[in-house]
Image (spheres, helix red, strand yellow):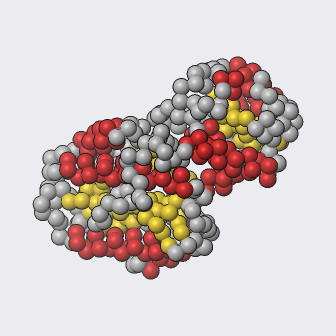
Amino acid sequence: MRIGMMSLEDDARVDFGWLRAQRREKVFSAMETHDLDALLLGGAGNVHYVSGARLLGRAGVLPFAPAAVVVRSTARVHLLSTWDEGVPPEITRQDLYGLSWNPANLMDSLASIPGLRESARVGIDGLTPMFAGLISQLTGSAELVDADSILAAARRIKMAEEITCLEVASAISESALGAMEDALWPGVTERDLLGVYYEQVARLGAPTAPSESVCFATPSRGPVWFRHLVSERPIGDGELVVLAPGALYTGYEAGLARTRVAGESAPAGWTDLAARCAVGMDALLGACRAGNTGADLYRAWGDAGNRESPVPLAHGLGLGAEPPVIGLGRGSDAVLDEGMVLSVQSWVVAAGVGGCLERATVVVEGGGASILTRYGRL
């Protein structure tokens, strides 16, 4: 059975208490394997994975700060929060430590967490020079270990309940794409389409968008670039417009992309360009099978008659974008394992016509890729 938007966070289709417990179990197992006594985490995906707390939407990038602390000896997760709204019940008020703009005060709060000061090996997923000194004062001679790769390995293979969350996020994205298609007509601006997207995902209960890179018109004259920021220019009749909405559901991200013609008159060469895009996508999807590597995706893309793509061919998905990144000269040795989730995309251009993008969210399986995206193709 495929899951759509009606799988609400409190619905019986996903036992979120069980899911949070399973994620914590995977993290504590990884800590034992790598002999880590504690974790100091600041990455949004890692914090959500260990805590299950509802995170605030934010724009921009923040410097590292320990937003969650995991202590192996006590088997407790501690969270940077001044209230328990959105915090799961298994994280009690005693497990919270207060927010402070003064780093010294924050370190004082961390010092009161049972078992942290005694830790001999501490994993971190980020660091700044200031916090490096403060953490050294907190933990003394403790060895600091890069925990980002350890958490990435724990998050790599998705449980069935995580796949369900990704299916719901994909369904929300598809609904947003339908709304954007209905609004696409000569004279509308990219910013207008962005507004339609925000309105639709908010209406479906997912107002925090993973990105505002959801649409752009491709020029039929001059170089064709892949753009991320919208413009105020009205879209002209016959222009090719990339629509690429994404959505978050309980922190899990999925998305898709299609390219549509504004108006009734498609430019000459559009049919051939769309066919090239579809052939490239089929080649990439065919290579997304367990046991293959990033090199197989590179090979499939080249064998489909394409030059090196200026955008990644694929990257991991889960609680936001995840490793591996395959494309732009990276990820050739990345191994695809059964249960991984990938965002796969085919981007091709033609001078005098424009650009064409197709993107899908897929689950890697032994026999090939299972496509979560159910929207009609090009």
Q: Position of residue 207 (x, y in %)?
A: 38, 37
Q: Quadrant of the C terminus?
A: bottom left
Q: Is residue 202 above or below residue 83?
A: below
Which residue in the rendered view is the most extreme toward the front? Answer: 12
Q: Position of residue 125 (x, y in %)?
A: 67, 43
Q: Residue at x 75, y 43 (%)?
A: 123
Q: Position of residue 317 (x, y in %)?
A: 51, 54
Q: Position of residue 259 (x, y in %)?
A: 28, 60
Q: Is residue 30 above or below residue 194?
A: below
Q: Quadrant of the N terminus?
A: bottom left
Decide if residue 212 is in sight here.
yes
Q: Nearer the viewer, residue 79 or 347?
A: 79
Q: Residue 108 lies in what quarter of the image?
A: top right
Q: Residue at x 54, y 56 (%)?
A: 160
Left or right: residue 174 versus residue 155 is left
Which residue in the rendered view is the most extreme toward the bottom? Answer: 303
Q: Residue at x 31, y 49 (%)?
A: 175
Q: Nearer the viewer, residue 161 or 218?
A: 161
Count how many numbered circles sit on residues in the image. Answer: 0
Q: Residue 52 lies in what quarter of the image?
A: top right
Q: Residue at x 47, y 33 (%)?
A: 58
Left or right: residue 274 versus residue 33 is left
Q: Residue 345 lies in what quarter of the image?
A: bottom left
Q: Is residue 210 above or below residue 224?
A: above
